[in-house]
Amino acid sequence: MPDTYTIHNDFIQVCIKRKGAELCSVKNNTYTEFIWQASSIWNRHAPNLFPIVGSLLDHEYRYNDKNIALTHHGFARDMDFDMLHQSEHSICFILQNDEFTWRSYPFKFTLLITFTLKNNSLIQSYRVLNTDTKTIPVSFGGHPAFNANPIGDFEIYFESNESIYSNILDGPYISNQLKPIIVDNKISLDLFTFNEDALIFQHLQSKWVKLVHTKSSYAVKVDITDFPYLGIWSKPGAPFVCIEPWQGLADFTSHNKDIFSKKGIIALGQNQEINRQFSMEFTG
């Protein structure tokens, strides 16, 4: 089975790794690369987060009176998916529970991640099915990193003027502190924007956000309509920006570790499924 798969149309060519079903390249007809090409600065491209988003307090959760360890952002990003089906313009990957996942997530599930091209856009969809006989806790999200070099030449625009503040992290956890970061509908990026780690937003009015290079036509527009939370992150001063549609959040510092009360967790009943998608439109 190949390690990397390619889909394409008349506008863009896309590569996805089998490991993590991770998007690793998007190039247009002029060979502009939009996706961060992993390096020692950050060795990922666009990991998929499942079955949680962010960190758990002490990297564990409480279920059936037991504390169960689960790593930051969950295990899916580090697992080999199987390719379920592929066409010229679309590809679907599948991950199911096994002995390894059972150690940190004692639930039966099927996770499908599908990539579909539409003109100069890439639609990434998540479908989670509960194949267990009990209710399972589910969360997921995207983490695509887009090239932005130098970062000071880039701005992030929101569809609407936003009056909300960003949550502030306390280590890997969310504190109750907030800070203003959006001015009207824009964040002007610089070397210090991410000195306190990720920007985390709840209750956005905007249905899309756009990363824009102020000195060219290069831009990436991310439709976040299906997702209640948004993360924006980079390493301080690094030449990329992650725009991350999330179904969940890291634990708050006050969380009680009950997995079903974690912010953004969906309690998925037997034989139920959930579907969410976001799109990325590439220009430049």
Image (cartoon, rainbow, N blue to C red):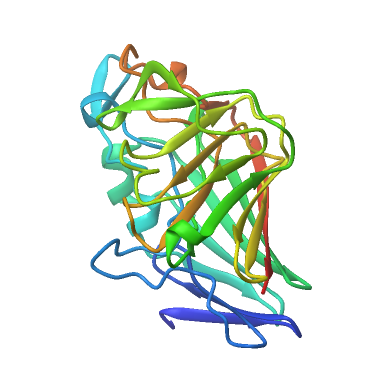
Q: Is residue 225 left or right of residue 45?
A: right
Q: Examine the rendered structure and indicate whether residue 210 appears above or below residue 42.
A: above
With respect to residue 200, does 113 lie above or below?
A: below
Q: Residue at x 64, y 88 (%)?
A: 30
When asked about the image quadrant of residue 118, the answer is bottom right
Residue lying furthest bottom? 30
Residue at 39% in and 64% down: 239
Quadrant assignment, res 253 = top left
Q: Is residue 89 above or below residue 60?
A: below
Residue 142: tell me if it is visible.
no
Query: Percent x, y for residue 158?
Result: 67, 42
Residue 255 at x, y percent in the picture = 34, 14
Residue placed at 39% from the left, 67% from the top?
A: 19
Quarter occupied by the C terminus: bottom right
Residue 223 location (% of width, % of height): 70, 49
Depth order, front residue of 99/146 = 146
Residue placed most toward the observer, 3 or 46: 46
Q: Is residue 167 or residue 17 the one in the foreground?
A: 167
Answer yes or no: is residue 275 visible.
yes
Q: Nearer the viewer, residue 102 or 184?
A: 184
Q: Residue at x 76, y 85 (%)?
A: 10
Image height check: is 87 above or below 138? below
| Left or right side of 244 for 106 | left
Residue 48 position within the rendered picture, expressed as x and y whole percent measured from the top left = 46, 53
Quarter of the image for the N terminus: give it. bottom left
